[in-house]
Image (tube, grey):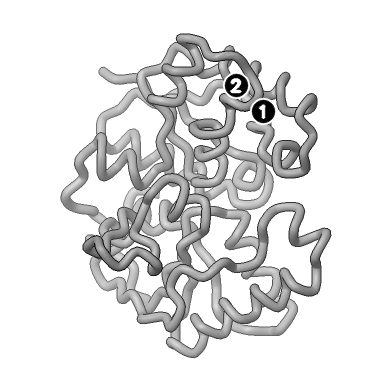
Amino acid sequence: MKRVALFIPCYIDTIYPNAAIATYKILKSLGYEVIYPKNQTCCGQPFANSGLTQEVKPLASNFLDTFANYDYIVAPSASCVGMVKHRYREFMPKSKELTHIQNSIYELSEFLIDIAKVKSINATFNHKVGFHQSCHGLRELKLGTPSEITTEKKFSKVRCLLEMVKGLEIVNLKRPDECCGFGGTFSLNERDISIAMGRDRLQDHISARAEYIVGYDSSCLMHLESIAKHDKEEIKVIHFAEILAGDIL
């Protein structure tokens, strides 16, 4: 049996634990041995985005020590997977351990589509949803086809999974892959711009009559949810893992 190490990033651990629980149960339901390594910490992405190179190095080193001996590493967060997969080479020398981890880490949807080869989902979600495609997943991990690419057939791994869910209707957005404005520390350093971008995205979903905004990065969902609550909008947010695991939670 293949061993899957569950990597749970900070936002999910602290604010959206149901996405972590859902991910665990989805992987278990597919027959994998799922292990949560207790020595895991932050992957270092916030420091890397702020230019704090020295602060990243011990976190990256701990990640390698913690996850080096597993067949797969799966996380319900595209931006954190992108950090490990594509940016760790900036902070440590090339090694067999680093190469193994970069080849073994997957965002949940790409693991389900590319490795587990999921063809059906035993879940029901009788709601209209707007699908928010976060920037790291779309353009760094290639979870879908960005709108600026016109020479390829449009495809989205998360959307493919959502379309297997009974009762779920994905609404059409005017700008389906526009940034929500979170951008980590950008939302702190450029607060007004960040909020304005978030409101634009929120209104696109509301205008399309979505009941939920569904996504694969909890940081983006947190940003949109906080604006919705401040503006007293009724629209809700949910991680796609919670929808897929609906009937087994």
Tell whether label 1 touches label 2 (CB within 8 Å): yes
Residue 39 seen from this side: no
- Residue at 65%, 66% in the rendered image: 181
Relative placement, left or right, of 73 versus 231 is left
In terms of image quadrants, where is residue 58? top right
SS label for mark 1: loop
Label count reads 2
Indicate which disc residue 41 carries: 1
Amino acid on which disc 2 is placed: Phe
Residue 199 is situated, as x and y percent measured from the top left of the image, at 65, 79
Q: Real-space Cα distance between discs 2 and 1? A: 7 Å
- Residue at the extreme left of the image, as rendered: 119
Q: Which residue is mark 2?
A: 63
Is 133 in front, or is 242?
A: 133
- Residue 197 lies, with reference to residue 5, above or below; the image says below
Q: Name the amino acid type tagged 1.
A: Thr
Q: Is residue 112 left or right of residue 102?
A: left
Q: Secondary structure at mark 2?
A: helix
Front-lying residue, 140 or 3: 140
Residue at 60%, 39% in the rendered image: 9
Q: Residue at x 64, y 73 (%)?
A: 198
Image coords of residue 191 (percent x, y): 80, 68
Tell me where residue 51 sits by quadrant: top right
- Above or below residue 216? Residue 100 is above
